[in-house]
Amino acid sequence: MTGDRTRVRYEKKQHVARITLDRPDVLNAMDLRMHEELAEIWDDVEADDDIRVAVLTGAGDRAFSVGQDLKERARLDRQGVAPTTFGSRGQPGWPRLTDRFTLYKPVLARVHGYALGGGFELALACDLIIASDQAVFALPEARLGLVPGAGGAFRLARQLPEKIAMGYLLTGRRLSAATALRHGLVNEVVPADRLDACVQEWTDDLVRSAPLSVRAIKEAAAKSVDMPLEQAFTAEYGWEERRRRSSDAVEGVRAFADRRDPVWTGR
């Protein structure tokens, strides 16, 4: 790989942003430069109102991502660079997707092959995961003297029953796609040759939904998950305030009454 080649491919078309981790020769391992590129991309996803959904995937046919570039980490260790811990504050690419808590557009992970370590943590930070039947998930940090610092220790414990989560966190054991589906960690598992079509079906449905409604729902779900139910009903949600005052809130009902497809403006 040449030194000036980009680490991430970024394409925008028909309200969908497609973000591809593009280091297939190292199974899409994430180095510091990749994190810097991703930060710029996530900033653009947030800022571009034409984008309604983002799809994150890995290049090649072997991996979504195997996480941190450990060769780079070993080199940094030899140079005396302090080891990392939980979160990305102070590191290149902050805030990374894994601790970018105000991105209220839906993000879908398209996973084929290995999603290990930080790669699995990236997928866990997405709202939807569509996996091929060849996907493999794991957080092997405990076997490497590390911790799953990009949210894996926190998200897996929230997305699985406690004992099951601890089993995978403390041992680094791998989950097959079928096991991940059984535990509710992924939305759908399909044969590899059906993966792109399945992702397209999901993105089509997301784009058909009103963009302000989608953002309001994601914000409300994310902010209220640890609230008492009574408090969740009375909390303030910025995107809901925008949605209920928008023309889209009227357009959807009118389109239904007129028996036509709604035309969303996001305003």
Image (tube, rainbow, N blue to C red):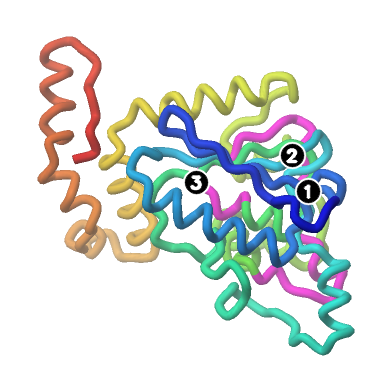
At label 2, the amino acid type is: Ala
Question: Dividing the picture into quarters, in which one does residue 171 lie?
Answer: bottom right
Q: Which residue is mark 1?
A: 23
At label 1, the amino acid type is: Arg
Position of residue 15 in the picture relative to residue 130 (left or right) = left
Question: Dividing the picture into quarters, in which one does residue 57 lie?
Answer: top right
Position of residue 93 in the picture relative to residue 63 (left or right) = left
Label placed on residue 59: 2
Q: CA distance from mark 1 to mark 3?
A: 24 Å
Decide if residue 159 is in sight here: yes
Which residue does the image show at 70% across and 79% down from the upper left? 84
Q: CA distance from mark 3 to mark 2?
A: 20 Å
Category of crowding for the residue at label 2, using alpha-carbon neighbours closer than 10 angstroms: few (below 14), some (14–19), many (at least 20)? many
Decide if residue 138 is in sight here: no
Query: Tag 1, which secondary structure?
Result: loop
N-terminal-most mark, 1 or 3:
1
Query: Tag 2, which secondary structure?
Result: loop
Query: Tag 3, which secondary structure?
Result: loop
Q: Which residue is mark 3?
A: 127
| The residue stretch that appears in magenta | 123-149
